[in-house]
Amino acid sequence: MRTAVAWVRVNLFGGVFSSLVTLAAAYLIGRWLWAFLDWALVHAVWRAPDGRACTAASEGAGACWAFLGQWGRFILFGRYPYDSQWRPLLVIVAFAALLLLSCDRRLWGRWLSPIWIVGLVLNLVLMLGGVFGLDYVPTDLWSGLPLTLILAIVGLALAFPLAVLLALGRRSEMPAIRALSVAYIELIRGVPLITVLFMASVMLPLFLPGGTSIDKLLRAQAGFVLFYAAYLAEVVRGGLQAMPKGQYEAADALGLGYWRKMRLIILPQALQISIPALVNIFIAGFKDTTLVTIIGLFDLISTASNAITDPSWRGFYVEAYGFIGAIYFVFCFFMSRYSGSLEANFRRGRR
Amino acid sequence: MTDNGPMIELRQVHKWYGDYHALKGVSLTVNRGERVVVCGPSGSGKSTMIRCINRLETHEEGQIVVDGIEVTDDARHVAAIRREVGMVFQQFNLFPHLTVLENLVLAPIWVRRMARAEAQDLAMHFLARVRIPEQAQKYPGELSGGQQQRVAIARALAMRPQVMLFDEPTSALDPEMIKEVLDVMVELAKDGMTMICVTHEMGFARTVADAMVFMDAGEIVETAPPEKFFASPESERAQLFLSRVLSH
């Protein structure tokens, strides 16, 4: 307590100017916070039969959370059959559990990949159905948060190993492999994600022989993986380049072959150096899944935009986008905090 | 594999870095159990030479044979040689993300296919030999330079190599730590390990060397037993070098 008081005195009221700035800032923050709470809580309306009544009840000065009561479930699960929506809910829970389990470093060695494989298969079965008495739900009905999570988590989880291979390929001593990796990375990085998604959804079917069709979600997912692999590869390469030559030589001198040297010595250290940059791309990638709206997939953005077009609940943009914004924020903030703690953890270990 | 005959043989080895002629026809034979100390001014090719022996550098001409296996591009040859040749670097090059014990068991487990428990016993044995068994669970970054270099020696020994190469093992150490590393090396020499040491520690050379090799400008200028080399070096370049090294 005393240290807190001392901290405040030194850092916030260290002089006349500093004190004035502190007071001014406190006033501005306080006013804004008050306005926000007033809108979000004090004047908010929690129950209303329709949008007009809701707006009337809040006198236009408060949030209309009744809108989310009506449409929240649609925003989360979209067009997924109403009676089966417990399935995507379980999928969301399963993804959250997978992410939390992945934070436990005791599982990193042997157990993490089997856990993920089992988890992903389970999620696929839950979403798709058609077995174990679950109704079959085609992928064009998948929507909302589960779709976003699948695109982002599966996408990044597949893009990452591909990126590592590309990064190693780019630094390979074999000219053909190096050239291929460089060509791939430069080509994909030079194209906007939207273009890749369009290619995957519109162009690709044109090249396929008639009669064959690949699922649209699968195509978008593949486009997403290929795109983010190129970006992540460059980050991993940065980490590889930062490794001192002596580490390679020591591993060579001990007789470790190329793959063991990379897996046991070089990559653990190179990836560790790359954590901030990797998480940066993970976060960007998570949010970039919103672009699939453009090729007609029904992710969180689409469900939210659709919800606000309901004639009897028209125009509650702030509530709808605030709601999904909060969802995105929770996931991104989690990634950011976790990477921070991971870095601190590694620093402690190595000093 | 026989018990007599040369362990390492270099015949007319040449090495270029672009236009720079780093090794100009180096020939050297090291027999089993022999301790060779290589000295010479910096840039004379000492490190390059021993790094060619386990293929950290490639040579362009000549022949290098280690334990009957020729050093070539063939990855299997290189792997076989590296299993038998331990190396200690100037900068230690321990793996900072692994504990001391993990540093030691890594290669025996993954290269020698040793069971983990056995590898750990072996590792503790060698940590005891370099006198730091109590540091097994620490990370390299928590140790002093001298301790790190001793761990590096133990790590190389844990592969049970037939030859040890030392590339200026004390040059990156603070003066007060040099002795603890040299003591370990002297003991190793007494146990009969075949060694090639690139070093400026002339006291160490006098104590353990069977042969002194003096290099300058990419050539072996003189090879002699230490008592002769230090008392009356034949070449002018060696005389000059010794007068500089021993004068302080």
Image (cartoon, coloured by chain):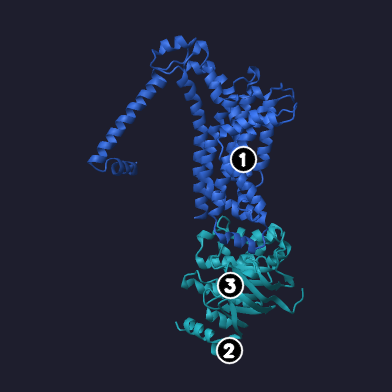
Chain colours: A blue, B cyan
C-alpha gap between disc 2 and disc 1: 65 Å
| B77 relative to A77, above or below | below
| Cα separation between marks 2 and 3 | 30 Å
Left or right: A137 as drawn, with respect to B206: right
CA separation in Å, label 3 and label 1: 45 Å
Residue at image point 64% right, 42% down = A112
Mark 3 is surrounded, within 10 Å at the Cα level, by few (under 14), some (14 to 19) or many (20 or more) other residues, namely: some
In this view, the residue in front, B245 or A225, is A225
Residue under circle 3? B21
* Residue bearing the label numbered 2: B228
- Label 1 Cα neighbours within 10 Å, binned few <14 / some 14-19 / many ≥20: many
Chain letter of the residue beneath label 1 in the structure image: A
Residue A114 position within the rendered picture, expressed as x and y whole percent measured from the top left: 68, 41
- The residue at 50%/69% (across/down) is B172
Q: Residues within 10 Å of mark 2 (few under 14, many from 20)?
A: few
Q: Is disc 3 placed on a helix, strand or loop?
A: strand
> Identity of the amino acid at label 1?
Ala
Location of residue B66 by image quarter: bottom right
